[in-house]
Amino acid sequence: MLRSPAARVLDESDEPAVRRLLSADPVAACVLAGRVEAAGTAPASLGAPLWGIGSGRSLDAVCLAGANLIPFSVPGAERAAAAAFAERARRAGRRCSTIVGPAAAVDPLWELLEPSWGPARDHRPRQPLLAIEGPPAVAPEPRVRPVRPAEIDVLLPAAVAMFTEEVGVSPLRADGGIGYRMRVEDLVRAGQSLAWIEDGRVLFKAEIGAVSRAACQVQGVWTAPEARGRGIGAAGMAAVVDYARTVIAPVVSLYVNDFNAPARAVYRRVGFREVGRYASVLF
């Protein structure tokens, strides 16, 4: 049961409770857990407020209110948490480009926010959350490797193409791409951007976009259009899984649109299994 009907802004004293909450489902909470492990729970260090429901010793739900609105709740607390988070979100006004997270937390939140924040540009209510804990079921492509900083200009067009194809808008539209390029550069420097680059062009790429001690989340998976249908995606993902499990975290996860049958087939072939469901609302 929820102890409080209102959400509050959490601070550094709440970090142990936040960590306990997120450990209930390390794969579904990977993005939030990674942020908290890296920056704690104070708004100044996180770069955005983290809202919470419950007492300092026991939290039932949290929601990071940054560039993305990311809710996470224990089972049974989703609707009460959504009501509290929606009230805060309405007062603050929409500043996020996406609401994303476990569907059980996103769905009731969007139901309450849609009258004031809608219409959304896109609503994706069924995004299977997949994970793999062991070695891939297909042979990894040995030419997939971490991207070097000197290759960012080679990688960037592929990253922009992937983002535009997946999200439906160019990441260059807001600030000429300055922020997006910085994000790409950060992932490259962290060793979290992998690609197969041949003759100055990217055939396959993926980023390990979120990292916690327990799990990581792969994002931005893309195969060059002319290279599709040749098994490159499966072999490339196998290489990403191998690298991530060796270097980053023991469990590798991702979420995929339910209507993307080719991608889902590739992930099944590699050995991913469905462990939950995400949902996204894009503005």
Image (spheres, rainbow, N blue to C red):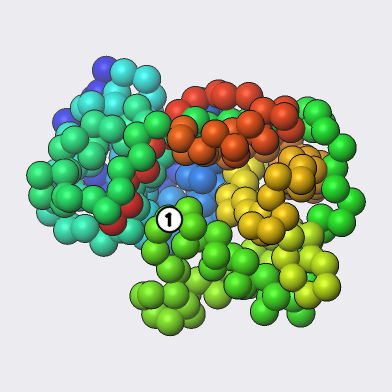
User: Compared to 182, does 71 lie above or below?
Assistant: above
User: Compared to 49, does 177 lie above or below?
Assistant: below
User: Compared to 178, does 123 lie above or below?
Assistant: above
Front residue of this view, candidates 119 and 23: 119
Q: From the viewer's perspective, tell me whether residue 65 is left or right of residue 203.
A: left
Tell me the residue that label 1 is attached to: 167
The disc labelled 1 sits on which kind of residue? Answer: Val
Quadrant of residue 150 within the rendered picture: bottom right
Q: How many residues crowd mark 1 within 10 Å: few (<14), some (14–19), many (20+)?
A: few
- Residue 179 percent across, percent down from the top left: 47, 74
User: Compared to 45, does 181 lie above or below?
Assistant: below
Q: From the viewer's perspective, tell me whether residue 100 is left or right of residue 138.
A: left
Residue furthest to the left in view is 115
Front residue of this view, candidates 85 and 269: 269
Residue at the spot x=69%, y=58% of the render? 226
Quadrant of residue 217 within the rendered picture: top right
Residue at the spot x=72%, y=55% of the render? 227
Quadrant of residue 108 within the rendered picture: top left
Residue at the spot x=57%, y=24% of the render? 274
- Residue 215 percent across, percent down from the top left: 64, 38
Q: Is residue 72 visible?
A: no
Residue at the spot x=55%, y=23% of the render? 275
Front residue of this view, candidates 203 and 57: 203
Quadrant (top left, top right, bottom left, bottom right) of the C terminus: bottom left
